Image: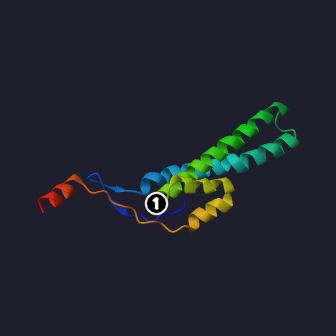
Amino acid sequence: MLGYPYTKNQTRGKNINMLAEYKKRADIGMGLGFLLWIVLPICGAVLLKSQQLPSYFWFLFPALFCGGIFLFIWGCTCYAKGKGYGRPVGLLGFLNLIGLLILLSLPEKDHISLPTIEDIEKAEIE
């Protein structure tokens, strides 16, 4: 969805893609969150106004709105974490699309590799 430059990290003896573990979470969170936060409540309000839905559906839209906010911000925190920033940077998601644009414009930080057990043992021998 958003495109990530991938870097390999060495973590506890396993080659993993640091950003890939957050990519799916960020895509799901931001996509579903945006859908629930913005699109569905607007469509629902139009349908309620045109009386295509029963009036007792009014309680559903605040729940969709709150759930959408939660998912969108969770996706933004995963995206920020995947770029190498802390989770608090992802709280820019409260600013909706402006916060997302700020997150997208942040440069990716270099990920710190943790030494493997073999690297530690090799350093102790030398």
Which residue is at 67% across, 59% downward?
Answer: 97
Q: Which quadrant of the figure contains the N terminus?
A: bottom right
Picture mark count: 1
- Specify the farthest residue to the top: 56
Asked which quadrant contains residue 7, the reply is: bottom left
Q: Is residue 27 visible?
A: no
Above or below residue 4? Residue 91 is above
Three-letter amino acid code at disc 1? Gly
Above or below residue 72? Residue 108 is below
Quadrant including the C terminus: bottom left
| The image quarter in which residue 36 lies | top right
As drawn, which residue projects farthest toward the right? 50
Q: Residues within 10 Å of mark 1 (few under 14, many from 20)?
A: some
Q: Is residue 4 left or right of residue 89?
A: left
* Residue lying at the far left of the rendered structure: 125
Taking the spot 52% from the left edge, 57% from the top edge, the residue there is: 80
**Any part of residue 107 in sight:** yes
Q: Which residue is the site of mark 1?
A: 84
Q: How is the image coloured?
A: rainbow
Residue toward you, 9 or 117: 117
Horizontal relation, residue 83 to residue 54: left or right: left
Percent across and percent down for residue 8 are 35, 62
SS assignment at label 1: loop
The percent coordinates of residue 24 (x first, y second) are: 49, 51
Residue at 36% in and 61% down: 112
Instruction: Give how far across and how far down residue 43 sits, in percent.
Output: 77, 47
Left or right: residue 38 versus residue 33 is right
Q: Position of residue 64 (x, y in %)?
A: 70, 40
